[in-house]
Amino acid sequence: MRKESFVFYRSWVDAIKDLSDNERLSFYEATIEYGCNGNKRTDLSPLVNMAFKFVKASIDKDKERYDEICKKRSEAGKKHRGNQYTKNGTNGTNGTNGTDNDNDNDNDNDNDNDNVSLSNESEKDKEREKETVNFENLIKNFNWYVDRNNSPLRKITTITEKRKKAINALLVNGYTKRDIEKVFEMASKADFQGAIGRVPDFDWLIIEDNFVRIEEGNFQKGAPKKQVGEKEPTKRVNDLWK
């Protein structure tokens, strides 16, 4: 598969901005190679490979959509030419082979379909761009759930570059900020001591394999009972996305 172009989303740049220069270069080269030639590199680092998996899925979906559009255009062109044969008994409405008319109609269809496709991609890109995290509020959000559920988890005070990379990798792989907050809440209610014999730290929670296990409820013991005299919080504080 060789293509002259492919769509490169701005959200991809945002997602890898905390990678090292060499990691970003490796990501760009792998993306261009796959987008233009369909070749998948096998020498990527684990972190770059996680980001690339999401990009590959997007490129594959774009190609499927493009192939479907081409198929519909081809079918529409055949139908158009068949109607001309039936109506006029000739190859075209003016006794010609119908090439000019077919090309005009195909061009119109191309423009219409391209406009729709670009519009859809633009809306998709806007949604992806919203998936940026306010890390200061992420700290407060995580600590809020730890306090709220009397969790033995240790609170965090800072987001290191390593943590930023791990969180951005989750977003690149298709998880949303809502998913991250949900896992924070579930982790604050989890029985890690009973399940794995220890209370993990924040860095363990945001490793994707562990993140998925928490999201699937593998460590849940049920929500803690409300203590007598305890007041429900009037509102949740510090959303990740504000």
Image (spheres, helix red, strand yellow):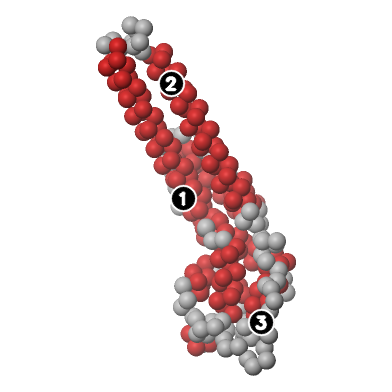
Crowdedness near tag 1: few (<14), some (14–19) or many (≥20) residues, C-alpha within 10 Å: few
Q: CA distance from mark 3 to mark 2?
A: 64 Å
Q: Is residue 56 left or right of residue 79?
A: right
**Which one is in front, 87 or 213?**
87
Q: Which residue is mark 1?
A: 57
Closer to the eye: label 1 or 3: 3
Q: Is residue 153 above or below residue 21?
A: below
In percent of width and height, residue 139 lies at 69, 71
Q: Which residue position holds label 3? A: 232
Residue 91 in the image: state x and y as whole percent: 30, 12
Question: What secondary structure is found at the residue carrying circle 3?
Answer: loop
**Residue identifier under label 2:** 105
Question: Which mark, residue 132?
Answer: none
- Look at 32% across and 16% down and name the residue there: 84
| Identity, as a three-letter code, of the amino acid under mark 2 | Asn
Q: Is residue 172 visible?
A: yes
Front label number (3 vs 2)? 3
* Residue 233 rendering spot, x and y as whole percentages: 68, 79
Task: Give the percent coordinates (x, y) of residue 164.
Answer: 65, 63
Q: Quadrant of residue 230?
A: bottom right
Q: Is residue 155 something that shows in the picture?
A: no
Q: In this image, 45 relative to 16: left or right?
A: left
